[in-house]
Structures are given as structure tokens and as C-alpha cells.
Image: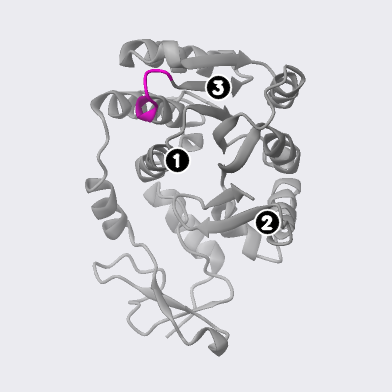
């Protein structure tokens, strides 16, 4: 079989309006792959080149299979409305996918979380999913610097009847987090989600570690960064920041971690 070039796959991703869901570079394709960057109905598999991993085959999502996953997401109607409105806006690719939002809501429910933080709200899809999962007494601190997208988010909080659960912090997220710490709210939050400036991930993480309790969870989005983190030829500032952040997390004994290839990649961290 011919090996797909990373550039061809990126082009296919753009044309199909799908997130890159598997790292192509440094992986070999199983013979079940059809053609170059095939989008045939048969699901392709990839396996690690290092045989010490036992030649384990893992599924690599095709557009058809991803559509199947989305068809099995329980998306509340209000979230669907927000997603469809956001899709018409500039920067709509920043919105998390429905399967990601469902995972975030489930983590909040599993934790029994009552106090949450979101860094990077955009139009509010992920924060609304979290707010809907919170109990009536729950609170979500939503940090966002863009007033236009925040207006959309607040409108949907109202429509969903959860605005009383959301405390909006308009401004630089780092400053908002520092103010929470200065206000004596350290170690009082159960859950945090980060989807903001990639070059600030380490800073956000350090601040959130002070705010989240032991046993609490911090989730970070875009840790696979469209596959660029695995491409040694890509060395722009954002890619390097995420690559370094991922490496730092591997060595950080303050948290347990799990990198999950959902959406553009999410890492779930549990504070020890």
C-alpha cells in the first residue's frame, strides 16, 4: 500500500469539513485501507510502528464512521440550535464537536461536580453542555475575552434556563483565574475545561491546579492540534506550545492523565 502524505490528508480534512481524527505521520496503514486517504465505507485501521506495542490495531475514523458516531450523540435541542447558529459564524471551527460536549457533560455528572470553570467560551456550546449537566445549585465560571461571541453564549444560557448557573468573566482568562485565587477560592472547584489561547496552556494549567480540588478534573482541548504535534516539520509557535505542554504533562506527577483522540484531541487530568 502507498503511504498517505500528511498534506493530502489535511486537504481532505478541509474539504470534508471534518477534524483530523488520527495522526498520519509515523503510523503505517493497514492493508484494509483503500487507495490514498480513502473515504470508502470500510473503516481503516492504523497500528504503531513500534512492535513493542504488540501490533495493536486501532480504528481511524472515516467521515462515514464519524457521522455514525454523531448520530449516536444525545444532543439536546438547544445545543443543536446553538451549534447550527455558530456554524454560520466566523471561526465556527473553534466550537467543540457534539461528541466532545457529551463527554464533558458526562465527566461533570460522574464527578458530581457543582463548581466548574471554563477557559475560552466562544459562543458557549461546551459551557452550555456543562451548565445543563450541573445541578440547580451548581455554578460555572465562564471566562471569555471576545464580547461578540459572549453575547451569543449568554443569549443561549437564557434560552436554556441556565443563566443563573453561569458566572461570566469577560476579559483575559488568566486575570480572571488569578482573581478567583486572590478571592480565596483555591481548591474549591471540581472541574475545569480549557479551550483558549494555545500558547497560554501551561499558564492556565498552573492557575487551574490551584483552583481545582484534589480528585478534581481539568480537561484541555486541541492537544493533537490537527496532527501537527506529530509532524517534526511543523514548528510554528502554537504547535510548539502544545507539543511542549503535552511533554510537560507526561512528566507532571501532580496529575494523572489520559489523552483521548476525540475531536482535535483532549487530555483529561485528575489532580492527585
Magenta span: predominant SS is: loop
> Where does the image place residue 171, in percent across and percent down from the top left?
68, 16
37 part of magenta stretch:
no
Mark number displayed over residue 142: 3
Which circle, 2 or 1, is nearer the viewer?
1
Left or right, 33 with respect to 55, comes to: left
Q: CA distance from mark 2 to mark 3?
A: 24 Å
In this rendering, the answer to whether 269 lies above or below 187 is below
> Where does the image place residue 44, in percent across and percent down from the top left?
34, 73
Q: Which residues are magenta?
A: 132-137
Residue under the point 51% across and 23% down: 140
Mark 2 and 1 residues: CB-CB less than 8 Å, in contact? no
Left or right, 255 with respect to 181, comes to: left
Residue under the point 67% across and 41% down: 198
Earlier along the polypeptide chain: callout 2 or callout 3? Answer: 3
Residue under the point 73% across and 18% down: 179
Quadrant in the picture for the N terminus: bottom left
Q: Nearer the viewer, residue 178 or 74?
A: 178
Amino acid at each position: 500500500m502507498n503511504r498517505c502524505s500528511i498534506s493530502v490528508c489535511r486537504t481532505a480534512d478541509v474539504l470534508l469539513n471534518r477534524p483530523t481524527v488520527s495522526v498520519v505521520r509515523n503510523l503505517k496503514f493497514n492493508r484494509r485501507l483503500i487507495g490514498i486517504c480513502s473515504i470508502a465505507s470500510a473503516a481503516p485501521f492504523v497500528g504503531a510502528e513500534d512492535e513493542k506495542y504488540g501490533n495493536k490495531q486501532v480504528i481511524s475514523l472515516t467521515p462515514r464512521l464519524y457521522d455514525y458516531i454523531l448520530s449516536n450523540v444525545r444532543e439536546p435541542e438547544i445545543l443543536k440550535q446553538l451549534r447550527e447558529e455558530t456554524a454560520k459564524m466566523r471561526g465556527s471551527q473553534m466550537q467543540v464537536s457534539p461528541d466532545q460536549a457529551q463527554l464533558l457533560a458526562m465527566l461533570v455528572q460522574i464527578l458530581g461536580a457543582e463548581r466548574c470553570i471554563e477557559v475560552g467560551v466562544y459562543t458557549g456550546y461546551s459551557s452550555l453542555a456543562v451548565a445543563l449537566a450541573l445541578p440547580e445549585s451548581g455554578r460555572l465560571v465562564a471566562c471569555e475575552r471576545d464580547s461578540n461571541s459572549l453575547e451569543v453564549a449568554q443569549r443561549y444560557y437564557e434560552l436554556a434556563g441556565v443563566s443563573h448557573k453561569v458566572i461570566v468573566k469577560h476579559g483575559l482568562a488568566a486575570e480572571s483565574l488569578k482573581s478567583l485565587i486572590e478571592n480565596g477560592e483555591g481548591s474549591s472547584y471540581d472541574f475545569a475545561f480549557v479551550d483558549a489561547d494555545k500558547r497560554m496552556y501551561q499558564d492556565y494549567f498552573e492557575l487551574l491546579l490551584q483552583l481545582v480540588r484534589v480528585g478534581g478534573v481539568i480537561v484541555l482541548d486541541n492537544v493533537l492540534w490537527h496532527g501537527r504535534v506529530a509532524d517534526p516539520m511543523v514548528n510554528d509557535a502554537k504547535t510548539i506550545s502544545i507539543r511542549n505542554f503535552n511533554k510537560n504533562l507526561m512528566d507532571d506527577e501532580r496529575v494523572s492523565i489520559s489523552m483521548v483522540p476525540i475531536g482535535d484531541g483532549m487530555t483529561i487530568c485528575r489532580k492527585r
